[in-house]
Amino acid sequence: MADPLDSEDGIFGRLRKGVDPKVQEEKTRLANERDLARYAKVQQRMSTAIQDNSTLPTTISNIHIRGATRTRKSFLDRIFNPILSTQPSTLEEAINQVSVGAEKLRRLDIFNEPISLFIDRPDQSDPSTTPTDINFFLSVQERSRLNLKTGTSVGNAEGDAYVNGTFRNVFGGAETLNVNGSLGTRTRSAYEANFETPILSNPDFRFQFGGLSSSTSKIWSSHEEVLKGGWAKLRWLAPGGGKHELGYNSVWRQVTGLADRASPTVRGDAGDSVKNSLTLTLVNDRRDDALLPTRGIFNKSTLELAGWGPLQGDVAFAKAELEAQAAVPIPIPGVKGDSGVSFTTGLRAGLLHPLPLGLNSESKPSRINDRFSLGGPTDVRGFRLSGLGPRDGGDSVGGDVYAAGSANLLFPVPGVGIDKPFRFQAFVNGGRLLALKKTDKEGNHAQQVRQSVKSTIAELGSGLPSMAAGFGLVYAHPIARFELNFSLPLVLRKGEDGRKGLQFGVGIDML
């Protein structure tokens, strides 16, 4: 007689069959739903209890951080000791203040999410406690110290393969050591190492220093540029949410690898130069999406002072660059809610003003590796890379003053939801890039330079800019924005390099 336990419908028979994946998936889904429902009820009860006792007189006896085994206690004390010294008066104030500290822990980027917060009464048998005392417990899990990553990336008209190593919480104070190496299409090789640490345990105020070595092919100017140098930066978050950065850079540059057809301008700037500069960058980004915004504004200002006074080096100038963007959604009659149609406009402008080097009384003309370049699929579409501005023979040699603008109308792709990162776009963009004009007016050298800057800026606004219009498809991938456009140059100046037809662009900072 057959053993019923061993039959197909018996216990061992069912075990041999295994578990139906669909049945297991359904069981897992139901279990997750039960857990979520239970968690929601607990959260609701906790929220109700806190609301009912929000005005309860409270003093914080202690704040315990559990799980931070590799983080220095003195580092954490700087975050939470001010809370203990000020002592909130009610339970609601206490929870809010400790939650602010927990949010700082999250922004340090050394702990996994979530960071759990618990409340408990201290041991009432302890004579040092009072009836209003409570203890806070923060449960954290530290992220892995070492992270190695390899892959490929694209951005601003180039692609590369890279290896990146990150060492977190190096000395137990949320320090980070980053080491990067990459080989690319334009940047043939790049190696960088930087060390960053928060100042006084503040995740919004950081100091960074590092060094780099890179080699970049600039085929539009018939040369290769080699950079080796270092920097130190202070980075902080403004109360309004803006990101600010103050830095010092010292870089040795070499214009080398000249092509046989290199122009006299490129050959004149070939060789070595040293740039020592101070930079200030201010960024305010209020867009809903950096790569495919539908609403919000963005502005970025960059100021650089090189070689002036004690900075020394081989070049001296003041350089300012401004970038702004605004996006607004466009409602469609008969369509409720977000239509997916938006209008985006952008503006960029820059000025390079020569300065006397050190204690010299006269300034020198700018070098090719300090000037602005303009044109290409990531800024003024419908032109080749660095296709606008001054040229010497077949080389683009850059300019000292520029302005560029773009207007884009984006609308959903038919059959694709508006929540998907695909859009059709129609655009018109344009810009001008000029070198400083020579002046014949009398006066000392400084007066002549100022007059040259004024006359060049005046010329920037005279006549139509170089322009192009077109339409295309946009895809906002998490790492970059991809565009395939059909472009038609409308205004093209002598020597400028336009591009009629299809143009493919990949970038993270598009006009």
Image (tube, grey):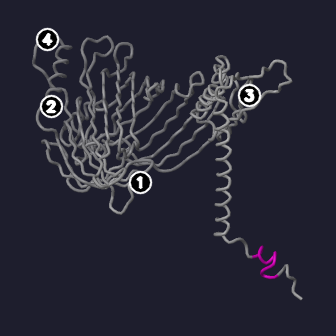
Please tell me whether residue 340 is drawn above or below residue 139 in the rendered image. Answer: below
The tag earlier along the polypeptide, 4 or 2, is 4
Dot 2: few (<14), some (14–19), or many (≥20) neighbours within 10 Å?
few
Would you name the residue on which mark 2 appears? 461
Q: Give the range drawn in magenta.
A: 7-16
Q: What residue type is labelled 3?
A: Asn
Q: Which quadrant of the rendered structure holds the C terminus?
A: top left
Q: How far apart are marks 4 and 3 (CA)?
A: 75 Å
Dot 1: few (<14), some (14–19), or many (≥20) neighbours within 10 Å?
few
In terms of image quadrants, where is residue 496? top left
Residue 437 percent across, percent down from the top left:
15, 26
User: Do tag 4 and tag 3 residues touch (Cβ < 8 Å)?
Assistant: no
The tag earlier along the polypeptide, 4 or 3, is 3
Q: Which amino acid does label 4 sit on?
A: Gly
In terms of image quadrants, where is residue 401? top left
Would you name the residue on which mark 4 appears? 443
The tag earlier along the polypeptide, 4 or 1, is 1
Local secondary structure at mark 4: loop
The tag earlier along the polypeptide, 1 or 3, is 3
Q: Is residue 232 visible?
A: no
Asked whether, in this view, residue 509 is left or right of residue 82, the answer is: left
Residue 110 percent across, percent down from the top left:
62, 36
Asked whether, in this view, residue 478 is left or right of residue 392, the answer is: right
Residue 134 percent across, percent down from the top left:
74, 26
In this rendered view, identify the residue nearer to me: 283 or 261. 283
Q: What residue type is labelled 2?
A: Gly
Would you name the residue on which mark 3 appears? 135
Q: Distance between the residues labelled 4 and 1?
A: 61 Å
Please tell me whether residue 114 is drawn above or below residue 202 in the rendered image. Answer: below
Mark 1 or mark 2: which is in front? Answer: 1
Asked whether, in this view, residue 17 is left or right of residue 425, the answer is: right
